[in-house]
Image: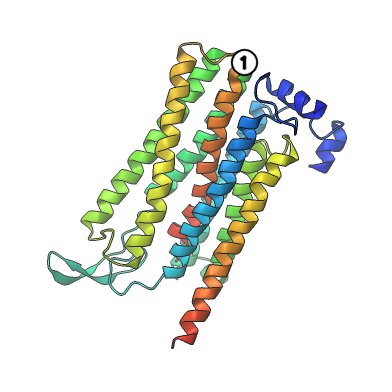
Amino acid sequence: MAQAATTTADAGHIDEHHWTSTGLNSRKIAIWAFIGSECMFFASLISTYLVYKGKSLVGPLPHTESQCMLQGKMQTCEAIFEIPLVTFGTAVLLFSSFFVVLALYGAQRGNRKMLVGWLSATVLCGLFFVGMQVYEFQHFFHKGLGYSTNLYGTTFYTLTGFHGSHVTLGVIWLSTMLYLAIRGKIPPEKALNLELAALYWHFVDVVWIVIFPVVYLMR
Amino acid sequence: MDAHSASHGTAGEHAHPTPGMYFRVAVLLFVLTALEVLAYELGRLPDAPLYTIVEPVVVPILLVLSAVKFALVAMFYMHLKQDSKVFTNLFVWPLILAAVIILSLILLISLWHKASY
């Protein structure tokens, strides 16, 4: 109990209403339990993607030329992936994790300028990543890869689409935090509110750390 | 973690990392991502230098680099290195279960696929 209280005091937030018999904050336990359940959710999507990898009968395919149905006739389609764009998006998402910990650092120390600045940067990075994914999906669709075109399309869109929807939810959550921060409603004693959003954001980041090599780099 | 604990007394008494530490982790994550793409490119182009060495091991390289990046974010940005071990358990055990699910499904389907031919 004393150990947990010290930890919380170190983090700069004292919340009397959410302590459990473990000595830990119930909301923080809840977000970690949620993240644990999300691990298994994404595991099922990643395993489905891997199980069906290379089993598509028609194109387009991610890394190689293939025969695919375009405008009502079979044609040779080029590989659809654009690795440089996705690599840039990955770097942006990684940096957004860096920005949100700086925002949290500012929130815990009552530095509103640092909080608002870095949180704004995080939201912008999140919006860029969502925009990149929308562009990518549109680009793939124009190259002939629909949701039900082949097994690859179904598993790819399901996996990356669910991740994208998580990023979108994260952006909405962080934007709400930014709005509150601008209005001065995240003082140091309420920094835990931002910490919970940040934990979710980092989770979205670590899922992409797995998806990026598994989906885009492994041929 | 143990060495860190030993230098600061009991396990829960750690301050969160400083911005300098966060920055070093960010740079490391960026470098590891660059290495992933480099490994991918070296293993993709037969004319590339080191192609014959990298191509057979590109998947293990990517998996190891990805695992290191995952651990860095979880330990430093999600503060698992400093926070209570309860949080680590809430995250790591489902993660192990998730890995078992992925491996089991791949094994099961590949065995079923072999048996059906």
Task: Please tell me how many numbered marks the rendered image carries.
Answer: 1
- Which kind of residue does numbered mark 1 sit on? Pro
* Quarter occupied by residue B53: bottom right
Q: Quadrant of the C terminus of chain A?
A: bottom left
Residue at the far top: name it.
A184
Q: Nearer the viewer, residue A213 or A189?
A: A189
Residue at screen point 67% across, 52% down: B93
Return the x and y of residue A191 as percentages of the image width and height. 60, 21
Q: Determine the chain carrying the residue at label 1.
A: A
Return the x and y of residue A83 as percentages of the image width and height. 39, 54
Return the x and y of residue B55 as percentages of the image width and height. 52, 69
Return the x and y of residue A133 as percentages of the image width and height. 35, 45
Q: Is residue A116 above or below residue B113?
A: above
Apparent side of residue B115 relative to residue A136 in the rendered image (left or right): right
* Quarter occupied by residue A5: top right
Residue at screen point 54% across, 42% down: A203
* Quarter occupied by residue A14: top right
Q: Quadrant of the N terminus of chain A?
A: top right
Residue at screen point 84% across, 41% down: B3
**What residue is pinned by disc 1?**
A188
Residue at screen point 40% across, 71% down: A54
Label 1 environment density (alpha carbons within 10 Å; few <14, some 14–19, many ≥20):
many
- Is residue A57 visible in the rendered image? The answer is yes
Which element is circle 1 on?
Answer: helix
Residue at the far front: name it.
A21
Residue at the far bottom: name it.
B117
- Is residue A88 visible in the rendered image? The answer is no
